[in-house]
Amino acid sequence: METFYVTTPIYYVTAKPHIGHAYTTIIADILARWNRLLGKDVFFLTGTDEHGTKIEKAAKEAGKTPKEFVDEVANTYIETWKALNISFDKFIRTTDKEHEKAVSEFITRIWDNKDIYKGIYEGWYCVPDETFITEMELNDGKCPECGRDVQKVKEDAYFFALSRYKDDLLRIFEEDQDFIKPPSRLKEIVNRLKGDIKDLDITRKSVTWGIPFELDKEQTVYVWFDALLNYISALGWPNGGKFIEFWPADVHMVGKEITWFHAVIWPAMLLAAGIDLPKTIVSHGWWTVEGKKMSKSIGNVVDTVELARKYSADALRYFLIKEKPIWEDGDFSESGLVSRINGELLADLGNLVARTLTLAEKFKGKIEGEEEIADNLDMSRIKELFEVYDVNGALNEIWTFVRSVNKYINDTEPWRLGGARLGAVLNNALEALRIISILLYPFLPETSESMQNQLGVKLGSINECKFVTFDGKVKRGKNLFEKIEVKQ
């Protein structure tokens, strides 16, 4: 059986999830659901990153132990993904014993291969971002990412020989232009990799909240080095059955700010350990909120659970995927979400389902006829877009078909027809709705299920997205979406 392995990053548990986390996870969920519909054996991994100085500091400020703190925040991620209908197969935490064991084993392996050595680290360090920063990367003496003060650090450390794999990685990127998507991100990584690459400090002597370093118990493993290994530890590396079945990953879904870690450091680690590389790193754009970067200090961090409860998980999922191309940055606004609910979801899809099922319930004749709108459905194009992970493009293509069915209803005016002609038009429209319910399942699972219940059909596979004679039992239920009244 063909397999498909998709991952999100594991999210750092200093705060509860926001729409940026939700966006990444929803895309991964869409890919997982789509590949299940293709009949593949799917493994969908997400989880939380729970070590490091930042966690120690946040826990102390909250009056909790680090373990109490991470347990509480990790649970908010699990509850958020449930609220958004995320169909993950495993939720990994870097405090899991199986993960800690895999990290220690991995370190021993690359030490034996002479890819780890002891040295002294001296440089700048950003505590909030858990990031060591070179002199050239400083922005007016501050962290280039968060803009906060950095500290000068000098301590004993162990290093991973990252520079040793520079040429190997450049060759891989040259031979496989699809390893990093989009091409613009691949170009950025290649240009940076061609510069001066230093070996990576992978331990901390001053940090106690971390996995003990296997070779020197006075040190703990650097949080990023530890975190990246979740993608194989979750599968039971090195000998677990799921690792044998699902590795290498088909796609790591990441935000563009962490592409370097996933596209350079992670592959180098795998090369050092003699493990196959993942097939693709998909690096998506960022979200702002009404034109501003999300920030707790500004108070514009969007609560995804609250939005899902207010408008429905499907409405939020639809907005985030439809609002922007996956590779580009986008801006969130609640008014924009309401506009898409009242417009596309209600006016396009909801009204199409309501009027088609109302006519079908009243009609007592035979529902069958020619597939007059079959050519409006470009399944090959939808499949092509999914193959390159363009979920925004795929949803746009599906919506083009939704609108074409609406136009077909308007043009044929079935409410004016009768007899065999009405039966043929209804067959076309009902079959279109059945197919749409399958295609929308990865994006809008609750809406898809509601459509199937009203059509009297079961969820089909992608192979069943073709017109036949409709054989469901129609029973119109509640509206898929209700109009949101906008208060001035």
Image: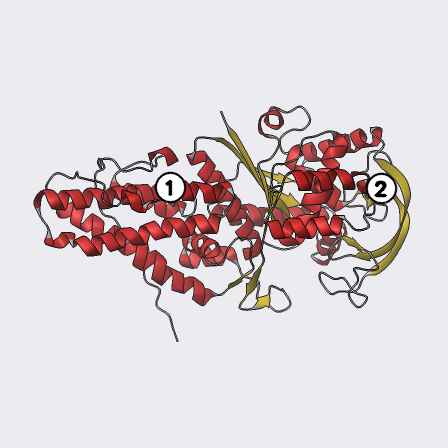
Q: Which mark is residue 259?
A: none
Please, which residue is most extreme toward the front here? 174
User: Where residue 295 sits in the image (x, y, percent)?
Assistant: 62, 64
Q: Camera-side residue: 327 or 11? A: 327
Q: Secondary structure at mark 2?
A: strand
Do the CB atoms of the residues marked 2 and 1 lie less than 8 Å apart?
no
Residue extending farthest to the bottom is: 488
| Res 94 seen here | no
Q: Is residue 271 left or right of residue 75?
A: right
Quarter holding residue 164: top right
In the displayed structure image, the side of residue 166 where residue 420 appears, left or right: left
The one of 38 and 13 positioned closer to us in this rendering: 38
Colouring method of the image: secondary structure
Q: Residue at x 62, y 32 (%)?
A: 248
Query: Which numbered marker is on residue 159?
Result: 2
Q: Which residue is mark 1?
A: 379
Residue 290 or residue 100, whichever sits in front: 290
Closer to us: mark 2 or mark 1?
1
Residue beneath the point at 33% across and 49% down: 401
Dot 2, crowdedness within 10 Å: few (<14), some or many (≥20)?
Answer: some
Tell me the element at label 1.
helix
Q: How far across and how far down the image is residue 205, in percent?
A: 86, 46
